[in-house]
Image: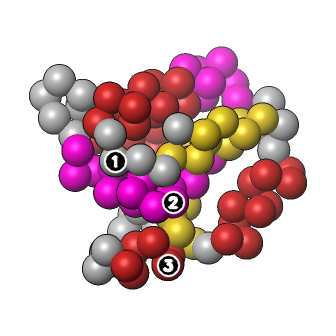
Amino acid sequence: MKLAIVLSTNNAETNWNAFRLANLALAKGDMVSVFLTGEGVEYEQSSSSQFNIQEQVETFLGSDKSKIIACGTCMKLRNQDDTEVCPMGGLEDLYSLVAEYDKVLTF
């Protein structure tokens, strides 16, 4: 299965759970893409000892069946630069995920 997850919040618990689900799907052999939009591009900043998002993201990016794409406009609005864990993309990338993937979940 090809699973797309759209994160639009910077809520630590929500994003932690979204990446936990993404990692479970990868462990089951699925292909998973995470698209960050709005406050979702700030997901790294909400990592904590209770909700270790960074650890989940490292596990996620360790798979060749995973990718993260972030809305470039949303990143620019927040003065964020393109990084390995938050690479810039656009609405065309989001459209492709919605059009081509089997399931799309939003958080």
Amino acid under disc 1 = Asn
Please name the residue that numbered disc 1 is placed on: 10
Determine crowd level at label 2: few under 14, some 14-19, many 20+ residues with C-alpha closer than 10 A: many
Residue 56 makes an appearance in the image: no
Q: Taking 94 as reference, is 39 left or right?
A: left
- Whole-angstrom CA distance, mark 2 to mark 1, is 10 Å
The picture places residue 62, in percent across and down from the top left corner, at: 45, 40
Q: Answer with the quarter of the image where residue 24 lies.
A: top right
The picture places residue 38, in percent across and down from the top left corner, at: 46, 61
Please tell me whether residue 14 is drawn above or below residue 36 in the rendered image. Answer: above
Residue at 13% x, 28% y is 49
User: Which circle's residue, 2 or 1, is located before the other in the chain?
Assistant: 1
User: Which circle's residue, 2 or 3, is located before the other in the chain?
Assistant: 2
Determine crowd level at label 1: few under 14, some 14-19, many 20+ residues with C-alpha closer than 10 A: many
Q: Secondary structure at mark 2?
A: loop
The picture places residue 71, in percent across and down from the top left corner, at: 53, 69
Q: Taking 59 as reference, is 66 left or right?
A: right
Amino acid under disc 2 = Thr
Residue at 22% x, 52% y is 45
Residue 57 makes an appearance in the image: yes
Please tell me whether residue 25 is drawn above or below residue 86 in the rendered image. Answer: above
Residue closer to the observer: 93 or 10: 10
User: Which circle's residue, 1 or 3, is located before the other in the chain?
Assistant: 1
Residue closer to the observer: 8 or 58: 8
- Whole-angstrom CA distance, mark 2 to mark 3, is 9 Å
Q: Taking 76 as reference, is 107 left or right?
A: right
Please name the residue that numbered disc 2 is placed on: 37
- What segment carries the magenta color? 24-46
Amino acid under disc 3 = Thr
The reply to whether the magenta stretch includes residue 26 is yes
Please name the residue that numbered disc 3 is placed on: 73
